[in-house]
Structure formats: structure tokens, C-alpha cells
Image (tube, helix red, strand yellow):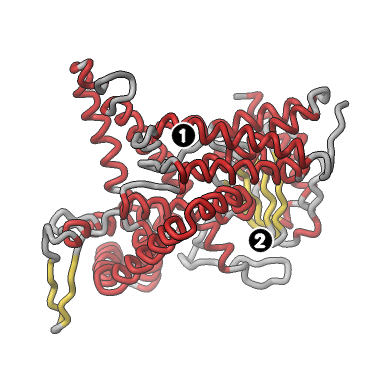
């Protein structure tokens, strides 16, 4: 622990002068892998030497969002950020000031920060908060598939060893419970992110998932009828909102805004009772009358568009997505995929994006191997590439992307080509996933077992790795070639 704090201190001591001093920093926060520092003036930043710091696997300076990003890795980045904030005195990111209002975030010109970038940062925060639950649910689903599907013999393991059937049942309940209640979890996280009291997010989540309401799936198949509410002659059809992540995100934002408003404007004597009551009452009305219908429509549009691309463009659509997916990681837009994947699973029962993301990841891993081969006599290059490759294997591409591939260019391009080829294989083998949240080696646990899913998952990722390496070696002859030293 002492050595870890020593490394954290070294990072903080190096970052402050590198960003032009503490006064140039607006706030610091983290996502799943990166320490992010929002800056007032990005022109003052000098990133030289930051990538050489202990624990830092890569550095990215985003001039569009005025943000310095240090890639540290999952788990460790939480502690590194907490130490950085405490040691430097730079504020941790918050969406709420002392009055309960949302503060304006300024860039170097004194203007509000880009609203789209704010949205991406908020989405990152929401899903970073709930990622452990999503990962747990996904892996448990995969583990239950291993127990209940015929994989290791003529019969499923639970039939070969009846004594483990109870364990399988408990695993299934655990995994199913997490994903069944995911809108509630998202509403909690979104409310917290936007500065409201998280327990009110949970409260509106229970309204969304009320057991007294029929499910959308049952209503769609006519297995049940919607509950009808008569509101001054307006007959509103009401169902539960299982799987509706976009609705949950909007409701979390709305609950936070209402909670802050009532806490600020109601007299202290009645605020304690009326603020939460009015927040939930108005939110519930908005849920069934406005937010729910709009959110469900938007979710259906997104799902329909994705399925149209998959069915219409076919193998070319799959190849194109897996070819560019890791480029999307560079921009930060990949944070939106969690909501889309959840919607796909709720609508279709499967997620065809997850294996495409995995092969795109492994394509970049092939680029890292190519870099290793070309620089195998360089001790520092070997250390960086080995560390980056192991991160790739467990679903984290940022150390490879920002530490090697983007800098050298040829591994990035070669990796994209490898990912595209593997994406075509994913289409041809009808490979999908039953959950999301993990790729690489651990992603095999959530591969759909149909169509020899586990075997094809392995082959698809191997194709991305091999062709990513081959094409990177080819591209190295033309783009920024490395010489063995």
C-alpha cells in the first residue's frame, strides 16, 4: 500500500506542472480505466514524460473537451483518483454546488462546456457506477450457461452431477435478478450523478418496475392487458418498464432536478416531508404520461436502426462496425453502447454488438503483438507492450490504444483491419452474446451457446488477433516503421 501511495504521489507531482499548475484544472474524476482532468486552457499542457510515470499505461490529451486523460487501469484508477483529488486539492467532479444548482463548467473562453461532451461525461459516470453489477450479472449468466448447456459431454453438467443443480438455480436467480432490475439500478446511479438523493432514484425505479403492472413483453404478445388510468378523460396505458435503460436515465435526471428544486424552494419546516413526496409524485406522472412513451419510442428506434443495419448490410455492416469500434473508443463515444446493448437484450434476448466489440479489441491486441515483434530488443517497449496486451486480454484497450497503437499508427490501422475481418466471421457464424459488459477472455462466459458459440467466440477473437498482427506488420513498412534496437 505504501508503494502504491508513493506511485500516486509521483503521478500527482508530475501532473500539476504538466497541466500548467493547479489553477488550470477545473475538476478531476475517473471512468473505468482513466483519470480524467478537465482543464481551463489546454494550450498550457505539456504531456512529455507523463507516459513514463509508474502505473500510467498511456496519455491522451483531448483538445475538443479540454481534458487530460491518464490511462491507469480498472480498480487501480479509483484509488489513484481519490489520492490525486485529496493530495492536490483539485475538486472532484460534481454536478451540484452548495445551493443544489448545477454549476456552469467553463472552458478557456469562459463559455459553457460543450453540452454533448457533458452528456458523454455524465453517461460515463452513470455506467462506471453500475459496471460492477453489470459485470457480475453477465459472468453469472455465462457460468449458468456452462452448467445448464451441453458443452462438456452428451448431457449438461447439472444432469451429470445433480448435486450442483441447486447452485445453478441460485446462480440463475442472481444473474437474472441483476438484469431484471437494471432500470432501477440505472435510475439510482443517474440520480446520484445529477446531484439528487440516490434513494429517490431507487424509489422511482420501484415505480418503473412495479409488480402491479403488466410487463411490456406480455402486453406486446397479448398475454396480458395494460393497466388503463383515466386522467381527466385521457386514458393512459400503463406497463412496467423492464429493460428500458433510456427511460431510467431520463428519470434519474428528472428526479435529481426536482429533488434539488424542492429542497431549495420549500420552507425548512415542511421540506423534509414534502420534497421527496412531490419529487416522486411529479416524476411518476411524468413517467407514465411523457417520459415513458418518449423513451420507449426512442429505444425502439435505436434498436430498429441497429437491426436494420445488421439485416440489410449483413457481413459488410458487421465488418464495418468491428473495424471502427476501437476508433470510437478514442473519442469516448463508446460509453453510449451500454444503454444500446441493454436495449438489444431486452428487445431481442441477444446482443450482437458484444462479440463485435471483442474482436475489434483483439485486433488492436494483434497490433500490440506486431509492435512487440518489431521492438523486441527494446526493454521499455517490451514492458509497455506486454502490459498493454494483458489488459487487452481482459477487455481493456485504452493502455494499448493510447500507449502504443495511436502513437505509432500502424498497429491502430492494422488492428482495425483485423477487427473487420473477424467481424465478418462473427456474422457468418451468427455469434451473439446473452449479456454485455465484458470482452476478451472473460467475454467467452457470456457468448450465446447456440451455433457452437463458445468455439466460434474463440475462433473469431483469434482471427482478430492474428490478422491484426499480420496487417500491422505490413503497415509498419509504410507508416512510422520501428527498427529493432
Let me know if residue 56 appears in the view: no
Q: Above or below — where is 440 with respect to 187? A: above
Q: Above or below — where is 327 with respect to 292? A: above
The x and y percentages for residue 325 are 57, 50
x 75%, y 34%: residue: 53
In this view, the residue farthest toward the bottom is 233
The residue wearing badge 1 is: 457
Q: Depth check: 229 or 154 in front? A: 154
The x and y percentages for residue 479 are 82, 45
The x and y percentages for residue 268 are 33, 67
Q: Using a 10 Å C-alpha cutoff, classify the residue at mark 1 as few (fewer than 14 neighbours), some (14 to 19) or many (20 or more).
A: many
* Mark sitting earlier along the chain (2/1): 2
The quarter in which the C terminus is drawn is: top right
Left or right, residue 234 beside residue 372: left
How many circles with numbers are drawn on the protein? 2
The residue wearing badge 2 is: 65
The quarter in which the N terminus is drawn is: top right
Q: Are marks 2 and 1 in contact (CB under 8 Å)?
A: no
Q: Above or below — where is 144 with respect to 62? A: above
Let me know if residue 477 appears in the view: yes
Could you say whether the residue bearing mark 2 is in a helix, strand or loop?
Answer: loop
Q: Using a 10 Å C-alpha cutoff, classify the residue at mark 2 as few (fewer than 14 neighbours), some (14 to 19) or many (20 or more).
A: some
Q: Above or below — where is 159 with respect to 228? A: above
Q: CA distance from mark 2 to mark 1?
A: 36 Å
Residue 171 position by quadrant = top left
The label on residue 64 is: none
x 40%, y 52%: residue: 189
Q: Depth check: 17 or 368 in front? A: 368
x 13%, y 84%: residue: 233
The x and y percentages for residue 103 are 55, 67
x 32%, y 52%: residue: 348
Amino acid at each position: 500500500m505504501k508503494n502504491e501511495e508513493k506511485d500516486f504521489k509521483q503521478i500527482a507531482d508530475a501532473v500539476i506542472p504538466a497541466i500548467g499548475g493547479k489553477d488550470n484544472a477545473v475538476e478531476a474524476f475517473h471512468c473505468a480505466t482513466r483519470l480524467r482532468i478537465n482543464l481551463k486552457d489546454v494550450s498550457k499542457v505539456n504531456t512529455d514524460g507523463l507516459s513514463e510515470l509508474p502505473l500510467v499505461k498511456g496519455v491522451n490529451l483531448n483538445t475538443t473537451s479540454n481534458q487530460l486523460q491518464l490511462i491507469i487501469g480498472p480498480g487501480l484508477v479509483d484509488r489513484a483518483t481519490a489520492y490525486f483529488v485529496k493530495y492536490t486539492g483539485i475538486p472532484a467532479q460534481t454536478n451540484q454546488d452548495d445551493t443544489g444548482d448545477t454549476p456552469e463548467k467553463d472552458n478557456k473562453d469562459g463559455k459553457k462546456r460543450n453540452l454533448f461532451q457533458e452528456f458523454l461525461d455524465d453517461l460515463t459516470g452513470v455506467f462506471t457506477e453500475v459496471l460492477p453489477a453489470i459485470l457480475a450479472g453477465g459472468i453469472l449468466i455465462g457460468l449458468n450457461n456452462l452448467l445448464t448447456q451441453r458443452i462438456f459431454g452428451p448431457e449438461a453438467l447439472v444432469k451429470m452431477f445433480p448435486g450442483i443443480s441447486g447452485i445453478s438455480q441460485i446462480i440463475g436467480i442472481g444473474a437474472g435478478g441483476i438484469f431484471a432490475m437494471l432500470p432501477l439500478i440505472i435510475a439510482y446511479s443517474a440520480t446520484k450523478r445529477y446531484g439528487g438523493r440516490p434513494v429517490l432514484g431507487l424509489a422511482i425505479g420501484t415505480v418503473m418496475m412495479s409488480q402491479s403492472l403488466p410487463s411490456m413483453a406480455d402486453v406486446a404478445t397479448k398475454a396480458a392487458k395494460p393497466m388503463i388510468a383515466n386522467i381527466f378523460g385521457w386514458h393512459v396505458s400503463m406497463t412496467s418498464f423492464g429493460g428500458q435503460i433510456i427511460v431510467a436515465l431520463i428519470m434519474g435526471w428528472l428526479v435529481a432536478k426536482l429533488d434539488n428544486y424542492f429542497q431549495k424552494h420549500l420552507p425548512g419546516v415542511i421540506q423534509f416531508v414534502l420534497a421527496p413526496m412531490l419529487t416522486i409524485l411529479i416524476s411518476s406522472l411524468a413517467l407514465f404520461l411523457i417520459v415513458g412513451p418518449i423513451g420507449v419510442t426512442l429505444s425502439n428506434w435505436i434498436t430498429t436502426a441497429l437491426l436494420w443495419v445488421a439485416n440489410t448490410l449483413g457481413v459488410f455492416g458487421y465488418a464495418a462496425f468491428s473495424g471502427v469500434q476501437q476508433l470510437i473508443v478514442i473519442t469516448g463515444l463508446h460509453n453510449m453502447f451500454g444503454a444500446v446493448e441493454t436495449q438489444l437484450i431486452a428487445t431481442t434476448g441477444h446482443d450482437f454488438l458484444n462479440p463485435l466489440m471483442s474482436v475489434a479489441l483483439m485486433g488492436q491486441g494483434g497490433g500490440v503483438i506486431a509492435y512487440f515483434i518489431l521492438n523486441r530488443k527494446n526493454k521499455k517497449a517490451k514492458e509497455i507492450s506486454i502490459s498493454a496486451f494483458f489488459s487487452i486480454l481482459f477487455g481493456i484497450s485504452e493502455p494499448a490504444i493510447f500507449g502504443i497503437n495511436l502513437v505509432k499508427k500502424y498497429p491502430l490501422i492494422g488492428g482495425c483491419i483485423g477487427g473487420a475481418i473477424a467481424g465478418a466471421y462473427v456474422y457468418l457464424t451468427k455469434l451473439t452474446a446473452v449479456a454485455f459488459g465484458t470482452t476478451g477472455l472473460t467475454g467467452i462466459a457470456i457468448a450465446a451457446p447456440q451455433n457452437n458459440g463458445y468455439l466460434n467466440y474463440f475462433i473469431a477473437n483469434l482471427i482478430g488477433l492474428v490478422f491484426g498482427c499480420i496487417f500491422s506488420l505490413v503497415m509498419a513498412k509504410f507508416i512510422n516503421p520501428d527498427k529493432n534496437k
